[in-house]
């Protein structure tokens, strides 16, 4: 778009002044080499053209200069066609990874120690119960040291109970202890279940 103004000169001929509002167009220098036309628009054809690292310019080659060899394309960047890459390897790695651990719950340590102590005191009855069933004296029942493992569920009840003898212990006593552990109850933990392991030693009978 242009705006013009006509002014009559003293010789009688009109003079026209125009104002150009369009952006000026700069012509390219005459000595700028013209890049060769792309005759093969396929991916392999585009890859065969000189790269920016080889020429220092994009698509410009000096007239008469030898064509540089194209930079080899890494295997992982080469055109693989229309087929998608397999995700079996990644999926196998994910399948072999260990599952994430659930969040650990919290119970006030002082309260937890009191509740564990009360439950441990009740385990002393297992030796007496076994002695009564076998009709023998309690000091004749072999009961010494155990490792107890259990989980306090978010409900406060126990699960995943396990009893391991570190010294010789009557099997009936161990069964009694495991059965008693399954009936334990604790304060409901905050934030998830709690997994515990504690040693337990029967009192000596004089």
Image (cartoon, rainbow, N blue to C red):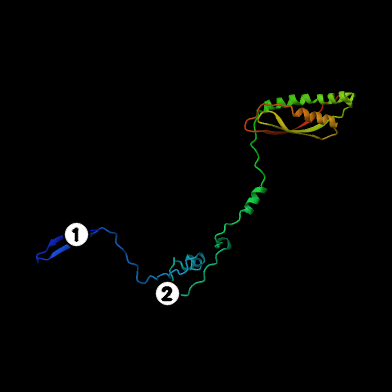
**Crowding near the residue tagged with mark 2, few <14, some 14–19, many ≥20 C-alpha atoms within 10 Å:** few
Task: Identify the image quadrant of the C terminus.
Answer: top right
Q: Position of residue 105 (x, y in %)?
A: 65, 33
Q: Which residue is mark 1?
A: 4
Question: Which residue position is annotated with label 2?
Answer: 63
Label 1 and label 2: CA atoms lie apart by 45 Å
Q: Earlier in the sequence, mark 1 or mark 2?
A: 1
Q: Is residue 114 above or below residue 57?
A: above
Say which element carries label 1. Answer: strand
Q: Position of residue 5 (x, y in %)?
A: 17, 59
Q: Quadrant of residue 171?
A: top right
Q: Quadrant of residue 178?
A: top right
Say whether residue 206 is visible.
no
Q: Residues within 10 Å of mark 1 (few under 14, many from 20)?
A: few
| Front position among marks 1 and 2 | 1
Residue drawn 57% across and 60% down?
A: 76
Q: Is residue 159 above or below residue 71?
A: above
Residue drawn at 77 percent across, 27 percent down: 180
Left of 172 or right of it: where is 184? left
């Amino acid at each position: 778009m242009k705006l013009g103004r006509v002014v009559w000169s003293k010789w009688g001929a009109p003079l026209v002044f125009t104002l150009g509002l369009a952006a000026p167009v700069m012509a390219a220098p005459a000595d700028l080499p013209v890049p060769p036309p792309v005759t093969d628009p396929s991916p392999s054809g585009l890859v065969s053209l000189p790269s920016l690292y080889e020429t220092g310019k994009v698509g410009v080659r000096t007239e008469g200069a030898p064509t540089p060899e194209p930079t080899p394309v890494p295997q992982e960047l080469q055109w693989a066609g229309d087929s998608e890459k397999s995700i079996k390897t990644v999926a196998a790695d994910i399948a072999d990874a260990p599952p994430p651990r659930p969040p650990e719950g919290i119970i006030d340590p002082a309260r937890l120690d009191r509740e564990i102590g009360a439950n441990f005191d009740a385990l002393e009855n297992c030796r007496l119960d076994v002695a009564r069933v076998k009709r023998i004296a309690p000091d004749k029942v072999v009961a010494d040291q155990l490792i107890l493992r259990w989980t306090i569920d978010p409900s406060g009840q126990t699960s995943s109970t396990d009893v391991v003898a570190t010294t010789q212990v009557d099997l009936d006593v161990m069964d009694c202890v495991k059965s008693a552990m399954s009936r334990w109850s604790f304060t409901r933990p905050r934030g998830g279940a709690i997994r515990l392991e504690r040693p337990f030693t029967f009192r000596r009978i004089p």
